[in-house]
Image: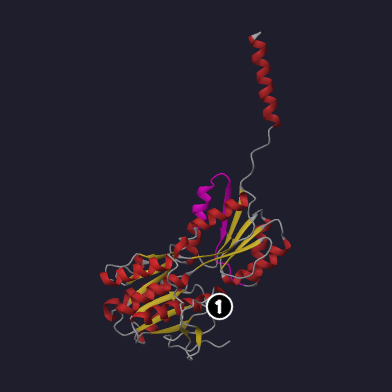
Amino acid sequence: MKTCNLALAGALLATAALNAAPPAAPVKIGFIYVSPVGDAGWTYQHDLGRKQMEATYKGQVTTKFIENVPEGADAERIIRQMAQDGNTIIFTTSFGYMNPTEKVAKTLPNVTFFHATGYKSGANMGIYNARFYEGRYLNGVIAGKMSKTNVAGYVAAFPIPEVVMGINAFARGMKSVNPKAEVRVIWVNSWFDPGKEREAAMTLIAQGADMITHHTDSTAVVQAAEEKHKEKGTWAFSYHSDMAKYGPTAQLSGTTHVWGDFYTKTVKEVLDKKWKGTNVWGGIKDGMIQLAPMSKSVPADVQKQVKGLEASIKAGKFHPFAGPVVDQDGKERVAKGKDMSDSDMNAMNYYVQGVASAFPKN
């Protein structure tokens, strides 16, 4: 009798196993990168976020990335191919991917897309960005306090609002503590071109800049400052990543981006079928912007001042574009007692007072 019961139980278990639904295949998630991953920079920070998210959902998701994808027509082809390869969540991580992402998203309603730094969204397309300008202002304060020439150099990629915003925030930070400070800008018209970035940095240093920073993806600007530090007393502020290993003497601090928690939270919403659209612009209070550790070369009183400002930004008590905001031509853009709106920051097409270079013409 026991033998029969055991046999029957075994048969029932076998039948149940045959009827059970097979385990769900991992969800495929794709990332499109504008530059090489490397070990520092914009793309590297996004890739750290990808790895954090994938580790959190190990077994539930698999990820793939394609690096060095040019902005423009080729991006559309690669985004579409990534979807055709079975990736049902796709992150496109550069401003110039906005229109190609939107175009592909409209034709593939069952794929969820997320675009970084843009402003177009849709039923299956979210957008996300970080408030880079908060870190830029704080770096500017350090520069203004420590500059001996009163000149900072800024190597910039493209004259779009997010880049202009960073230049202006850095200049306002400098001017807030040093009325004589000025920022000079050289545009390289590329997100990643170490040769051009280095050449621009060297030109700015030759023009008297003893503070150098960049809105480009490589470590070339920090390396140039390190090379010239002993001779010229040049200091650097990194961008995207902490690049101190490339400027162990020259780097004073930097503005770093942290994407891991955003990727982890957003993917969970999609996996749980609770995603209802994403329009995220996170800053210091959200943990998406952090200062790179301040060098021991930064005086203690300056470190204290910067940490106090950082706490005020985090608490919502201080805004880097608090009025009055006045442009190069003397036009008041924000009145005293008001803060610049997000929409106005995202349409910024002018330099503020404190930027010595002429704004690029279309």
What is the three-letter code of the residue carrying label 1?
Asp
Give the structural element (helix, strand or loop) at label 1: helix
Residue lying at 56% horizontally and 58% vertically, measured from the top left: 65
**Quadrant holding the N terminus:** top right
Instruction: Say if residue 242 shows up in the picture.
Output: no
Q: Is residue 68 magenta?
A: yes
Q: What residue range appears in magenta? A: 49-71
Q: Is residue 343 left or right of residue 321?
A: right
Q: Quadrant of the C terminus?
A: bottom right
Q: Is residue 315 left or right of residue 6?
A: left
Residue in the picture at 45% in, 63% down = 285
Closer to us: 232 or 24: 24
In percent of width and height, residue 217 lies at 47, 70
Q: Quadrant of residue 142?
A: bottom left
Asked whether, in this view, residue 172 is left or right of residue 146, the answer is right
Residue most toward the front?
A: 337
**Residue 341 picture location, percent across and down:** 54, 75
Using the image as rendered, state which of residue 171 and residue 340 is in the foreground: 340
Above/below status of 318 relative to 81? below
Residue shown at 31% from the left, 85% from the top: 149
Q: Nearer the viewer, residue 337 or 343?
A: 337
The reply to whether the magenta stretch includes residue 174 is: no
Report which quarter residue 30 is drawn in: bottom right
Residue pictured at 69% horizontal, 67% vertical? 103
> Looking at the picture, how far across and down is residue 254, in whole percent?
39, 69
Image coords of residue 239 (percent x, y): 43, 70
**Which residue is the site of mark 1?**
344
- Residue extending farthest to the top is 1
Q: Taking 318 as reference, is 174 above or below it?
A: below
